């Protein structure tokens, strides 16, 4: 008769045990349990463009239901290259594009391909929790540079100090989740200078690239002098087209780099999403009015949520892009965003996410929470109405 051993299970990889539970899973479960409006997880509550979903249906009917090529179908790889030229003037060869199962797989494959055990990876915090997990998977060591509220700027000296003789890689997310920050050109030039001086590769997560507001412009790091040859640029269709469940992402980098990433990627999913890849070609070729309309819609939703949170008594921080608005809960008498987020569904019927879980320096984000703004206007109106009771 077997018995359960006391203490940690010796068969488990110790470095991954701290990543068992996702804050998004916890808060989404709390939303279901309480019937609260879920402004925690960043996914829209509408379908994507009808011509894109129709293209997926047609691809299924046309028989594109078996394994696509492991690098992605040629049409989508060319569409990604054309997109980079169209929006950013980047000259990308379709042979240097790799399609992945969402941006998440590309990020994981890039880190595992480029980081040896014990080597260091510099990230900006708060960081999307996936970054910490994939660095651990690779056996890497995380070094965090803090983005300081309210504008989420960083100290260039702190970035320089984070780089050491064992640093291999720098990870950059812009537009930035969870803060809504968009790194400006001067900040990107600082990142580029550090990367070039220390001969680092940079992996960039640009999935919110089409969601910038108030005249703010997304600048791909690969477009800066000296950076195309040392940057792995990653994006996806999930956020830009409201199709997060399709999990179609991509990466591009010059030959040797993208081949290294693909070497890992082919042993993860190998390939996926044959009809969705074909539909994503249609998505990337939508007219400019789609992309400007997306940004205008999300700007209006940001304004609605920011005003509602301020009226409810929170200290709201500016957001220049993405699906998210962050706010400080101290004016409401809380000194911990986790406590606030666990109380909120019962108090108001709304779910948010505590940002402290995205920091190594927990004190820097202890009182900050994130609200997703990518829901329908009527849902956001109802959520802000529920939160209005906090002011009392």
Image (cartoon, grey):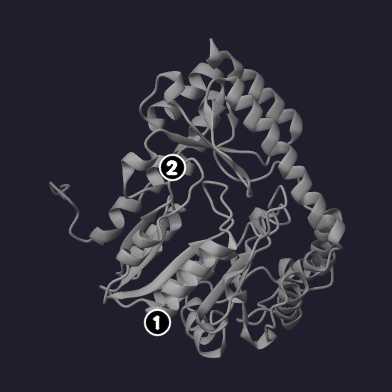
Q: Is residue 332 above or below residue 290?
A: above
- Work out which residue is located at the far left of the displayed protein and give it: 6
Residue on which disc 1 sits: 199
Residue occupying the point 26% across, 60% down = 15
Looking at the image, residue 362 sits to the left or right of residue 294; the answer is left
Crowding near the residue tagged with mark 1, few <14, some 14–19, many ≥20 C-alpha atoms within 10 Å:
few
Q: Nearer the viewer, mark 2 or mark 1?
A: 1
Secondary element under disc 1, as helix, strand or loop, is loop
Q: Which residue is mark 2?
A: 23
Please tell me which residue lies in front, 292 or 269: 292
The answer to which of 68 and 85 lies nearer the viewer is 85
Residue 315 in percent (x, y) is at 51, 28
- Residue 271: x %, y % from top left: 59, 75
Q: Earlier in the sequence, mark 2 or mark 1?
A: 2
- 105 in relation to 166, above or below: above
**Visible residue check, residue 12:** no
Residue at 60 percent of width and 43 percent of height: 319
Q: Horizontal and vertical percent for residue 95?
A: 65, 88
- Closer to the camera, 114 or 35? 114
Q: From mark 2 to mark 1, how far is it between C-alphas?
A: 35 Å
Within the image, what quadrant is residue 37 found in? top right
The residue nearer to you, when weighing 62 against 359, is: 359
């Amino acid at each position: 008769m077997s018995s359960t051993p006391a203490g940690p299970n010796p068969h488990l990889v110790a470095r991954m045990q701290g990543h068992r539970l996702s804050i998004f899973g916890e808060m989404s479960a709390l939303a279901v349990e309480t019937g609260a409006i879920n402004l925690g997880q960043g996914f829209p509550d509408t379908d994507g463009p009808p011509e894109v979903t129709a293209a997926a249906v047609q691809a299924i009917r046309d028989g594109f239901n078996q394994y696509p090529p492991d690098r992605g179908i040629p049409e989508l790889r060319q569409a990604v290259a054309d997109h980079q030229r169209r929006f950013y003037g980047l000259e990308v060869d379709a042979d240097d594009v790799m399609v992945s199962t969402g941006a998440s797989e590309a990020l994981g494959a890039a880190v595992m391909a480029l980081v040896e055990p014990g080597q260091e990876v510099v990230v900006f915090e708060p960081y999307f929790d996936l970054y910490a997990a994939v660095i651990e998977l690779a056996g890497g060591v995380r070094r965090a540079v803090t983005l300081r509220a309210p504008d989420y700027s960083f100290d260039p000296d702190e970035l320089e100090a984070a780089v050491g003789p064992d640093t291999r890689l720098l990870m950059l997310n812009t537009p930035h989740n969870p803060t809504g920050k968009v790194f400006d050109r001067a900040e990107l030039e600082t990142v580029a200078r550090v990367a070039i001086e220390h001969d680092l590769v940079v992996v960039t997560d640009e999935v919110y690239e089409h969601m910038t507001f108030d005249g703010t412009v997304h600048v791909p790091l690969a477009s800066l002098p000296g950076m195309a040859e040392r940057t792995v640029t990653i994006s996806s269709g999930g956020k830009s087209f409201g199709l997060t469940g399709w999990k179609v992402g991509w990466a591009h980098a010059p030959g040797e780099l993208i081949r290294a990433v693909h070497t890992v990627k082919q042993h993860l999913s190998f390939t996926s999403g044959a009809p969705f890849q074909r539909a994503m070609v249609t998505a990337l070729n939508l007219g400019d009015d789609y992309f400007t309309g997306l940004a205008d819609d999300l700007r209006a939703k940001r304004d609605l949520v920011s005003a509602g949170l301020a009226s409810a008594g929170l200290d709201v921080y500016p957001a220049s892009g993405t699906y998210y608005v962050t706010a400080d809960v101290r004016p409401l008498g809380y000194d911990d965003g986790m406590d606030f987020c666990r109380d909120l569904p019962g108090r108001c019927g709304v779910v948010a996410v505590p940002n402290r879980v995205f920091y190594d320096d927990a004190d820097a984000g202890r009182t900050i929470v994130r609200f997703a703004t990518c829901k329908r206007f009527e849902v956001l109106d109802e959520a802000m109405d529920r939160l209005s009771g906090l002011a009392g």
